[in-house]
Image: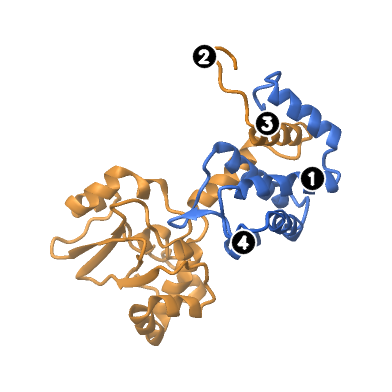
């Protein structure tokens, strides 16, 4: 319509024009800032969700029966805590110990246990992480700041549409007597992916 | 943040489109429409139910479709527009006028 050259952007579609109109009016009225919208979108891409997983891990740390249940039947144990949203994929919890370290990846795309971990971090979806973790896991973990003893066996768990893994990190030392709620705060998203350990409790806490 | 749970528990026909669990925005405007509706709710302009009910009504109005489809964010946008108009947050004149400016390229940037 605007000639044969593509120097000008295509006319906006109806939905684009409507969305921009809304955003520009809301900005003018001072009801929104562009940053507020960015923050929401990126929060859903990065931050939401790990709390569910942290609750699962903390419960497993304090309740040996629950831990057994979680390792045997992930979906049922997770559902028991009122966490929903699973779309039929099977959730497998894998336990980290002093001798075995599990770390999750999806080599094919970006399968991720989102009901417990929220939206995946950007690096999880990056081709270098997906390919290198399988080839040189020890080095990749080192780059994440996690140096494992040479004697520790690393198991790279490749997620798929059917099976999603959740890493059950080791309970940090010095946490005896902490409440389940306080323990959950030590459980980071990265520790449930397996690129970090659970946070050590603050000294003197 | 209660809204996270609201979003996470939008099931069945109002469930957000996901691929491998990730929210899927096929085009940038979809992300903007998503973010605006949540951000204004976060500012306290309306309870989430008021948005969600309109979203359900929009989706229901297209009989025969089920589950998150390619039109999901068109429904989302329509519901968001109705909510803003019905709450008096903006007027139809403002909206139509501004829309025409963008559609005719008199205005290009939001800022």
- Residue A205 in the figure: left or right of residue B82: left
Res. A98 image quadrant: bottom left
Which label was assigned to residue B84? 1
Image mark 3: chain: A
Residue A5 vs residue A45, the one in the foreground: A5
Q: Are marks 4 and 1 on the same chain?
A: yes
Task: Name which residue lies at 55% across and 16% down.
Answer: A8
Q: Secondary structure at mark 2?
A: loop
Asked if marks 3 and 4 touch (Cβ < 8 Å), the reply is no
Q: Quadrant of the N terminus of chain B?
A: bottom right
* 3D distance between C-alphas at marks 3 and 4: 26 Å
Name chain A's colour. orange
Q: Which circle's residue, 4 or 1, is located before the other in the chain? A: 4
x and y, in percent, of residue B32 in the image: 61, 40
Q: Nearer the viewer, residue A15 or A185?
A: A15
Colouring method of the image: by chain
Disc with the residue nearer the chain's start (2 vs 3): 2
Q: Chain of mark 4?
A: B
Q: Which mark is residue B13?
A: 4
Q: Is residue A204 above or below residue A13?
A: below
Say whether mark 3 and mark 2 are on the same chain.
yes
| Circle 2 residue | A7
Dots 2, 3 in contact, CB < 8 A: no
- In the rendering, which numbered label is found on residue A17? 3
Check disc 4 and report its element: helix, strand or loop. helix
Mark 4–mark 1 Cα distance, whole angstroms, equals 22 Å
Provide the letter of the chain coloured blue.
B
Q: Marks 4 and 2: same chain?
A: no
| Quarter of the picture holding the C terminus of chain B | top right
Q: Is residue A141 left or right of residue B67?
A: left
């Amino acid at each position: 319509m605007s000639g044969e050259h593509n120097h000008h952007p295509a006319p906006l579609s109806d939905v684009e024009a409507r969305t921009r109109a809304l955003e520009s009016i809301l900005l003018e009225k001072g009801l929104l800032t562009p940053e507020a919208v960015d923050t929401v979108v990126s929060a859903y891409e990065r931050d939401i969700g790990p709390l569910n997983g942290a609750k699962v891990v903390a419960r497993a740390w304090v309740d040996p029966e629950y831990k057994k249940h979680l390792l045997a039947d992930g979906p049922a144990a997770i559902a028991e805590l009122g966490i929903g949203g699973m779309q039929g994929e099977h959730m497998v919890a894998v336990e980290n110990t002093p001798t075995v370290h599990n770390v999750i990846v999806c080599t094919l795309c970006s399968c991720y246990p989102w009901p417990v971990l929220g939206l995946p971090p950007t690096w999880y979806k990056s081709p270098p992480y997906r390919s290198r973790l399988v080839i040189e896991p020890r080095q990749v973990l080192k780059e994440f700041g996690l140096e494992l003893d040479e004697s520790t066996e690393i198991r790279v768990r490749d997620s798929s549409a059917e099976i999603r893994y959740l890493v059950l990190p080791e309970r940090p030392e010095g946490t005896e007597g902490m409440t389940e709620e306080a323990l959950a705060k030590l459980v980071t998203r990265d520790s449930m992916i397996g690129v970090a350990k659970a946070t050590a409790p603050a000294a003197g806490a | 943040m209660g809204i996270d749970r609201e979003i996470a528990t939008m099931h069945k026909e109002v469930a957000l489109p996901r691929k491998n669990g990730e929210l899927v925005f096929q085009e940038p405007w979809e992300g903007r429409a998503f973010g605006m509706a949540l951000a204004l709710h976060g500012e306290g302009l309306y309870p989430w139910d008021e948005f969600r009910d309109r979203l359900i009504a929009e989706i229901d109005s297209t009989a025969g479709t089920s589950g998150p489809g390619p039109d999901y964010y068109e429904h989302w946008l329509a519901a968001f527009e109705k909510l803003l108009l019905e709450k008096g947050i903006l007027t139809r004149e403002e909206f139509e006028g501004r829309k025409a400016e963008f559609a005719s390229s008199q205005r290009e940037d939001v800022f």
